[in-house]
Structure formats: C-alpha cells, structure tokens
Image (cartoon, rainbow, N blue to C red):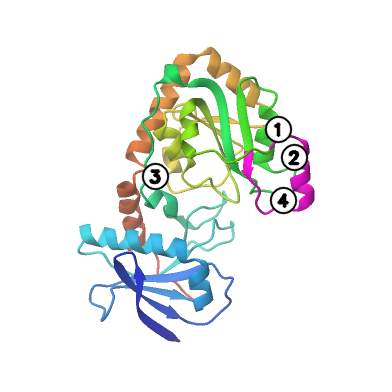
Amino acid sequence: MKTFWGILCGRSKIAATFVGGVESSQITRWSYDRQRHGQPLAVQFTCPEQMRRLRSRWRVLAAAIHSCATRDEGLFFDDVTIHLGDAVAPDEPDNVLAFSRWPGSRARLIPNPYLLQAPPRLPAPRPWDEKGDSLYFRGASTGASDYSENARVALCSVARTIPRSDCKLSKLRQIDRRFAARLAADALVARPDHVARMNDHRFLADVDGNASSWDRYRLVGMFGGVPIRFETAWEECWHDALVEGHNWIRADRDTLPHVIARLRGDEEEARRIARNASLLAATRLTPAAMEAFLGRVLTSATPASGSI
C-alpha cells in the first residue's frame, strides 16, 4: 500500500492511497475526518492508472466534499464505497454509492459530476412566443451498440417523420464503421451545435446514452423548454422529483409523433410543463442543492467491506 499526501484538487488537497488491483475498476473508497493528520479527505484507488483515468470525476466529487465541509464543521464519513463509472447494474450491493443505476439496483445514488458543477454561462431563456414550435436534440451516439436498439438513433429516426423537428447525432462515439455508415445513409448526423441552440426550441428531447443524460434536464429547464424524456430508464438521485405530466412528458418511438402533436395543440399544457421543469432546475438541481444532498448521503452511508 502506498499513500501520497497532497494530491491537488482545485484549491484543496486529498490523500490518495493505492491498494493494488485492476486499473479498469470503477470502485473507490472515501473518508473524511478533520482529525486525520495531513489532509482530512482521503481517497483509496487501486493504482495510479485508475486515479488518472477517473481524474475528471473524482476531482469534481472531492471539490464538492470540501465545499460541504465549509458549511458543515461536523462532516465525517469513513470508508465509503463510490462507483465512479457511468452507472451500476442491479447486482451492485446496497453499500455502493453511484451516479446512476438500472431499475432494481440496490445501490444508493449521489449527484453526477455535471450537476455538482455550475452550469456554463448561458443566455437567458427566450420568451415562449419567440421559441420555435419545434422538437430539438443533439447528442452523441452512445447507448445500445445495436442500431435498432439505440434510443438516440430511434429518436432521430422518428423525428424525421414529425414536422418542424431537428434531431441529430452530432458526436459519433463507441460505434463501428458500419454503424456510422448507416447513420450517414439515414441522414441522422449533423455538426455539433452550441448548447444555446436549445433556447430556440419549445420541445427538447432527453435521451439516455450509456446511462443517464447527465445535466441535460437541467439545461432544458434553464432554457424554459418542455422535457420530452424519450425511452429513458436509468435512475438518478433527483428523479423522485419527476412527475409525469407535471414537469416532464414520456415518449417512445411509437408515441412521439402523437405526444408532439398533442402539445402543439394544447399550448397551455406545454407552457405549464415548461414552467414546472424550470422551477425544478432552479431549486433541486443547483450545485448548492446537489452538494447538500451529497453530504447527507455520505454521512449516512454504510462503510465498505472487502477489497476493491
């Protein structure tokens, strides 16, 4: 076992311990104790390679924990297991904390790294009457490796049948040449847009990739759009605040055309859902709210057992 004190994390530091194990592991262990000699925040990795690979995620998490500690002098937790991958499967034990989980998993949820960070500086939401009566999506080709099963491909394919829709894949990720060639043949690829383009549309699709879509719902709410959650399945820590028909609308490859047609025909319903989504984004999904949630989960977490 090797311990290195003083690994930089923003303006703070952590104590990183390497205990041996496979580099591909997503499992880490975390402790926070102000009485510890050196740095109060300690993180246990398998090896330096794992620490480097997961660097962007553990750094955000560590910064959020240090921020929690400035508001809570009694913050303490010991040997808590955190899975730093996109999501965990149903067989993960209930003492593991994760950013996202498949329905049926017993793992406890914590905010994903994007929600723990301040959103990018964005323009104010355009008034509803100045937005296009249109459906919009841009995203990567992540998700199912089978073309017909990939939800993002399905969204873009179905959207082609809906007037005033602009749904395309703008980053080709985790696919082979055959998959990419089919996307091009089906005209489902476009150049990446600036995130502010979401502000031009009333109906904004939210679709799972490898797991959840990270901070997309928050962006939809910030821009005052209607969240169309298309074939979503992965669960996040804030999903208990989602109420279908209140602050989001469900759709799949069979119902999407009818959902958009109904919302276009009932503008008051669409406006109401957009307002409620904006309220959720401005209250529950702020970095401060997410940090507070993270602190509560960590202090109530069950200590780890076994090796990583």
Q: Amino acid at mark 2?
A: Ala
Residue assigned mark 4 = 145
The structure residue drawn at horizontal position 65% and vertical position 26%, both measured from the top left corner, is: 255
The alpha-carbon separation of the residues under discs 1 and 4 comes to 16 Å
For this view, does 39 lie left or right of residue 156? left
The earlier-in-sequence mark between 2 and 1 is: 1
Quadrant in which residue 232 is drawn: top right
Residue assigned mark 1 = 157
The alpha-carbon separation of the residues under discs 2 and 3 comes to 31 Å
In the displayed structure, would residue 20 be above or below residue 122?
Answer: below
The earlier-in-sequence mark between 4 and 2 is: 4
The structure residue drawn at horizontal position 49% and vertical position 32%, both measured from the top left corner, is: 198
Which of the two marks, 2 or 1, is nearer to us in this view?
2
User: Is there CB contact under 8 Å for labels 1 and 4?
Assistant: no
The alpha-carbon separation of the residues under discs 4 and 2 comes to 16 Å
Residue assigned mark 2 = 184
The earlier-in-sequence mark between 1 and 4 is: 4
In the displayed structure, would residue 74 be above or below residue 267?
Answer: below
Residue assigned mark 3 = 120
User: Is there CB contact under 8 Å for labels 4 and 2?
Assistant: no
Which of the two marks, 4 or 2, is nearer to us in this view?
2
**Magenta residue span:** 169-188
